[in-house]
């Protein structure tokens, strides 16, 4: 049976004639899940989310119900909900669709979450570049307030929550939750040291704070609509719901495909949904879940054991699209933003492109990340301009090894992983590039740096 | 101080949304920049006063976030996504063509002040690369082979008195911006 999509998050926004207006949302069953939620006790809503097995969609896949449990209630301080709509991981463009095409779906999830954790106030931290997106959200909030779904005395429950849209300033690192909080406090977005700054304990204004991704909020709406136990049946044990695969790069049909967790493979995603490689080309590699996940090479074999004990021996095409299987292959599902690279690409250029990104985005607090990202960028670029040495290949690896695990935030890993995963897999090709570039040859006309 | 009266009223409403005034730093800086295109020392002093911090603490913020400018941009500000998904679809070739067509080297403003052309990092529309943000609008699938026509369109917009004033319609570059 061919793999099919199962649109949950994108079900409405794909309908012809569907608009961002609240009337359209209401006609499509909108805010019914919120009514269900406020008829329940907040703890019961938290329980539903825990039972659902929902994992966060911001990249790390942390179980949402568990995160909410970490809130420090004993402190007596107010708690805040902060929605991470800073979407800036290269390859990732799934949250944009929700914001620009179905904002009320996200707002309903926000209202449910705010009720569940009894947030005093909610902030949506949105990328500064989403100028019109911020306006769409502000209009939608005003509509929802007018109908009693947000703001004062939500649906007569006596509970009130204001939602404020806050635009960032174009910094990737402000997507990191503690950098985001600093930024929201009006400062540079320097990530904070954990411990003690776990947001659920010491977050915004040093109050307990839940930071969740924009799509996670939309998923919460569906958890309530289905009920936690029913939602948990979608997908596979340990990874419930759907994943939005945002495919970009060199395939016939780049695009967004919403697939039940574990119900299709990378092969099906890339060939059946995306139509395979461009004419006359062959796939070479994918970066599966946003640029910070480790690269997978076509032709590799992936062998090992899944958490449930099942042994596997897969080609890239056989890997099922769920977080357990993908993690077992040494990488991560991340944000589901899959970047596809084919045989027209000179791999050192692709790496150099990403290295330049991380060098641009480091906040500079930690020496390994600040210096390491810059060095990686310079060394890889030097190869592409003909000035590389064969010793640059182990040098790249050596630098990356000194960054990962030695920094305040996971940007350090993001800097290191593309290099640590690609250098062993493409060492021969890099060496070939170095030799040919030294002679003034251009291995590929496609310029990426 | 050359801020428009509407900016001044908006500023107070923005500050009132936050439990702590300092949180309004980024929104106020966006407001100022939208008012007159970039951020001056005077603006920073004004923001500092408004939110109860020193001008230095505002400067710190301005210099951290790439979207804030301390000098004017050209009449059209063109940002081409440079990052991998867009690059794989030709954003480097696109940039080279635009430099020629607009007579404007990347990272600079053209001598006539009409264009500022920049490479930027991923703008979260990776499946539609190469993407280009021109002021308030986001253009998708701008293929390198169409660069000249695209540049012409930008040039023509200089003559359009309605530029940037229309209500965005779903699915258009203005909506997606
Ligand atoms: C450098 C860096 C950038 C990040 N950018 C984003 C982002 O743009 N959007 C997002 O939701 N999470 C981002 N994250 C992850 C957040 O720190 C956080 O884990 C996430 O918002 C939690 O939401 P979730 O539990 O709903 O997944 C980033 C993390 C790092 C280290
Ligand atoms: S790891 Fe990098 S981005 Fe994160 S805090 Fe350190 S320097 Fe900043
Ligand atoms: S890489 Fe260009 S929009 Fe993401």
Image (tube, coloured by chain):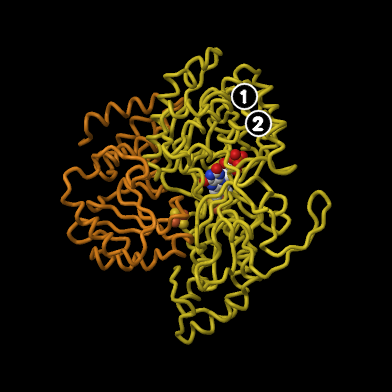
Q: Is B44 on the left or on the right of A62, as rendered? A: left
- Dots 2 and 1: beta carbons under 8 Å? yes
Q: Chain of mark 1?
A: A
Count of all numbered marks drawn on residues in the image: 2
Chain B, colour shown: orange
Q: Quadrant of residue A45?
A: top right
Is residue A238 found left or right of A242 in the rendered image?
right
Q: Is residue A16 above or below residue A282?
A: above
Read off the residue under disc 1: A116
Q: Going by the image, does B42 lie left or right of A126?
A: left
Q: Which mark is residue A68?
A: 2
Q: What residue is shown at x 61% (from left), y 21% (from top)? A: A36
In percent of width and height, residue A377 lies at 50, 66
* SS at mark 1 in the image: helix
Nearest to the eye among marks 2 and 1: give it. Answer: 1
Name the chain under label 2: A
User: Would you say B46 lies left or right of B60 here?
Assistant: left
Above or below: residue A34 compared with residue A191: above
Residue at point 52%, 79% (across, down) = A388
Residue B32 falls in image quadrant: top left
Q: Colour of chain A?
A: yellow
User: Callout 2: few (<14), some (14-19), or many (20+) C-alpha neighbours within 10 Å?
Assistant: many
Depicted A30 relative to depicted B65: above or below? above
The residue positioned 69% from the left and 34% from the top of the image is A52
Give percent across and percent down for residue B129: 43, 58
Q: Position of residue B171 (x, y in %)?
A: 37, 44
Task: List x then y, in percent, for residue B146.
Answer: 31, 64
Can residue A192 be seen?
Answer: no
């Amino acid at each position: 049976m061919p793999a099919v999509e199962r649109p949950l998050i994108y079900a409405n926004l794909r309908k012809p004639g569907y608009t961002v207006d609240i009337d359209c949302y209401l006609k499509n069953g909108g805010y019914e899940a919120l009514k269900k939620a406020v008829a329940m006790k907040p703890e019961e809503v938290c329980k539903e989310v825990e039972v659902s097995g929902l994992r966060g969609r911001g990249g790390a896949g942390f179980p949402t119900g568990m995160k909410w449990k970490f809130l420090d209630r004993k402190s007596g301080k107010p708690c805040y909900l902060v929605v991470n709509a800073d979407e800036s991981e290269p390859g990732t463009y799934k949250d944009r669709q929700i914001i620009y095409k179905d904002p009320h779906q996200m707002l309903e999830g926000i209202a449910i979450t705010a009720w569940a954790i009894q947030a005093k106030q909610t902030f949506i931290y949105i990328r500064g570049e989403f100028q019109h997106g911020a306006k769409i959200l502000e209009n939608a909030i005003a509509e929802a307030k007018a109908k009693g779904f947000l703001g004062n005395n939500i649906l007569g429950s006596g509970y009130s929550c204001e939602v404020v849209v806050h635009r960032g300033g174009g910094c990737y690192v402000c997507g990191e939750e503690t950098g985001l909080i600093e930024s929201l406090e009006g400062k540079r977005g320097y990530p904070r040291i954990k411990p003690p700054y776990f947001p659920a304990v010491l977050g915004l204004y040093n109050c307990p704070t839940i930071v969740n991704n924009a799509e996670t909020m939309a998923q919460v709406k569906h958890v309530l609509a289905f009920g936690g136990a029913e939602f948990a049946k979608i997908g596979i044990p340990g990874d419930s719901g759907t994943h939005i695969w945002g495919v970009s790069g060199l395939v016939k049909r780049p695009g967004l495909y919403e697939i039940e967790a574990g119900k299709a493979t990378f092969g099906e995603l890339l060939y059946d949904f995306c139509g395979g490689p461009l004419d006359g080309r062959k796939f070479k590699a994918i970066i599966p879940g946003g640029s910070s996940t480790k690269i997978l090479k076509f032709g590799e074999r992936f062998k090992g054991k899944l958490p449930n004990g099942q042994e596997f021996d897969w080609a890239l095409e056989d890997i099922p699209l769920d977080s357990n299987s993908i993690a077992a292959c040494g990488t991560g599902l991340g944000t589901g933003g899959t970047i596809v690279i084919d045989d027209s690409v000179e791999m050192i250029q692709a790496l150099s492109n990403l290295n330049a990104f991380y060098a641009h985005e480091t906040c500079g607090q930690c020496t390994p990340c600040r210096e390491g990202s810059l060095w990686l960028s310079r060394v890889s670029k030097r190869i592409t301009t003909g000035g590389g040495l064969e010793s640059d290949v182990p040098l790249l690896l050596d630098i990356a090894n000194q960054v990962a695990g030695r920094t305040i935030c996971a940007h350090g890993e993001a800097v290191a992983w593309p290099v640590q995963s690609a250098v062993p897999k493409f060492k021969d090709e890099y060496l070939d590039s170095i030799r040919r570039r030294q002679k003034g040859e251009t291995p590929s006309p496609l310029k990426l740096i | 101080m050359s801020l428009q009266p509407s900016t001044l009223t908006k500023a107070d409403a923005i500050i009132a949304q936050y439990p702590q005034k300092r949180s309004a730093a980024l929104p106020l800086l966006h407001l100022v920049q939208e008012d007159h295109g970039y951020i001056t020392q005077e603006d920073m002093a004004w923001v500092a006063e408004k939110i109860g911090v020193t001008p230095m603490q505002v400067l710190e913020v301005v210099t951290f976030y790439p979207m804030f400018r301390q000098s004017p941009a050209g009449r059209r500000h063109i940002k081409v996504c440079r990052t991998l998904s867009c690059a794989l679809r030709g954003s480097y070739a696109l940039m080279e063509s635009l430099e020629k067509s607009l007579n404007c080297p990347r990272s600079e403003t053209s001598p006539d002040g009409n264009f500022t052309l920049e490479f930027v990092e991923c703008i979260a529309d990776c499946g539609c690369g190469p993407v280009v943000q021109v002021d308030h609008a986001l253009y998708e699938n701008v293929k390198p082979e169409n660069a000249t026509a695209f540049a012409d369109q930008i040039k023509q917009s200089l003559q359009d008195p309605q530029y940037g004033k229309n209500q965005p319609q779903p699915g258009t570059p203005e909506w997606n911006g």
